[in-house]
Amino acid sequence: MEYIFEYEFEVRDYECDVQGIVNNANYQHYMEHTRHRYIQTLNLDFMTLTNEGVILVVAKAELQYKKPLKSNDKFVCRLNVQKEGIRYVFYEDIYRLSDNQLCTKGKFEIVSVINGRLGVSEKIDKALFG
Amino acid sequence: MEYIFEYEFEVRDYECDVQGIVNNANYQHYMEHTRHRYIQTLNLDFMTLTNEGVILVVAKAELQYKKPLKSNDKFVCRLNVQKEGIRYVFYEDIYRLSDNQLCTKGKFEIVSVINGRLGVSEKIDKALFG
Amino acid sequence: MEYIFEYEFEVRDYECDVQGIVNNANYQHYMEHTRHRYIQTLNLDFMTLTNEGVILVVAKAELQYKKPLKSNDKFVCRLNVQKEGIRYVFYEDIYRLSDNQLCTKGKFEIVSVINGRLGVSEKIDKALFG
Amino acid sequence: MEYIFEYEFEVRDYECDVQGIVNNANYQHYMEHTRHRYIQTLNLDFMTLTNEGVILVVAKAELQYKKPLKSNDKFVCRLNVQKEGIRYVFYEDIYRLSDNQLCTKGKFEIVSVINGRLGVSEKIDKALFG
């Protein structure tokens, strides 16, 4: 897979649990933040969209945890996106920076809820796929 | 699907984001807590296992978000578990209590890492499947 | 101090860090949730107030950490509130249930921002102090 | 106050609540991460210390919330530290980068628990105060 965007992070200790590794739920946070940063580069802002009545909602999330991230690890989340019907499917993979080890693979199916109903936002379509 | 365990929660406002709904990652928290509560009823404790060198690790997580939970919602997480090879597969579904609406479906494939290597813990096997 | 409200919790493993104890920031979550539950008993809802343009904001927080909570601990957060000028001062103390040990003391000074300006909401005043 | 260390952040949307501003507890996270980054520059690592039986514990936290951080805000946490008896007192202030506005002031009193008892670690003393 080719990636079209990436965003760098480092593990914060409060994200680690008693096993000394990042708690599973936090990978969703990392991937959400990467998506929001990506759409910002397209002049789409999550908060602004929300206030305009266009609610981007995750319909399905799949995460494969391959190697755990630990305290102090620096890592990058790399992203691509495809359109499947009315869904935007984001593929997001996390790599540890020290050795480029693939740590987590994510797939997020996202739908738009516009004024309360499933729909397609032309503005988003154009921004994502030109 | 039949369920073998359930655990009740209520939404806390800090779990909601600017859309006024529970942030996606928090559903993993709810489901993790339900698993930990369930294995406690079998006299397995997550912290104790960790200290004994038996690390239960989520290898794969799938979540389907059907209806969002909102501020003040009370809900229940219902669980079942199967063994598939060396994996424990937990099915966990979240229902809003006011109307028994299915809100989120979860599937978690969990493996045991024993002293640093993938393995099967007899103690856990016996506790989960008798 | 006399308390006028209390709310029960139990520690969730994802709230614990690598030391095996609840991360400091989570006590603010517990205390926030207790405040929101309390004002609900007075028919004040945090989300509704927010939507009406009355933003309750913490201006100052003080927490004294006396004994750490651990995995599986059940505990209660007990609360009282006083008015000091335009501030509502909430005193919130967390006790471990197994032995009634005082674990954390909290003090929260809260102000109302009404349509963007510091103010006093009669509705809240009446609800809190009759 | 002079500062001796600073660390840059940006707000992530999952840190914001329904008011569209960063939830209060997250400022503790930012300040904790800044402390951990700071002591790393002195070759002290929070995880390593924990594993060696030296537990750094927050005994008291005070936070003054002056201006809320919002989605997309970039900010910096600036830090200084003093010794008062057996306590390390960290002063940590958060400034919004766009206009250098002071947003949050923090004061954290930290003690060392060494093999289960309050104590002073020479190693930490030397690292912090030379």
Image (cartoon, coloured by chain):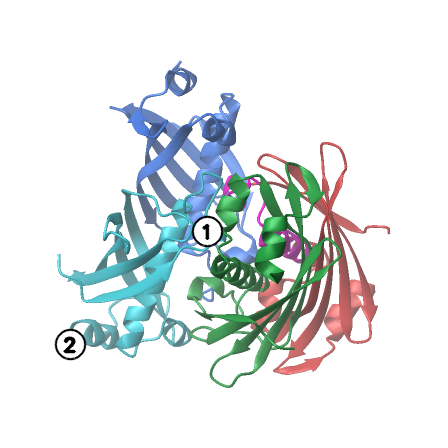
Chain colours: A green, B red, C blue, D cyan
**For the view shown, which residue lies furthest in the right direction?**
B1
Nearest the camera: B129 or D36?
D36
Instruction: Please tell me whether mark 1 sits on a helix, a strand or a loop.
Output: helix
**In the displayed structure, does residue A107 sit left or right of residue C11?**
right
Q: Residue furthest left?
A: D1
Question: x, y percentage for residue A107?
Answer: 67, 65
Residue nearest the viewer, comparing A5 with C54: A5
Range drawn in magenta: B13-36
Can residue D25 be seen?
A: yes
> Which quadrant holds the C terminus of chain A?
bottom right
Tag count: 2
Residue C123 position, x and y percent, is 41, 17
> Residue at coordinates 27% horizontally, 24% vertically from top-left?
C86
Could you tell me what secondary structure mostly forms the magenta stretch? helix
Q: Amino acid at mark 2?
A: Gly
Q: CA distance from mark 1 to mark 2?
A: 37 Å
- Corner quadrant of residue B130: bottom right
From this viewpoint, is residue D86 visible?
no
Q: Say if the magenta span includes residue C119.
A: no
Q: Residue at x 45, y 50 (%)?
A: C26
Q: Earlier in the sequence, mark 1 or mark 2?
A: 1
Q: Which residue is mark 1?
A: D15
Please say whether residue B29 is one of the residues in the magenta stretch. yes
Q: Which mark, by number, is residue D130?
A: 2
Q: Residues within 10 Å of mark 1 (few under 14, many from 20)?
A: many
State the image coordinates of residue A15 (x, y, percent, origin top left). Answer: 48, 63
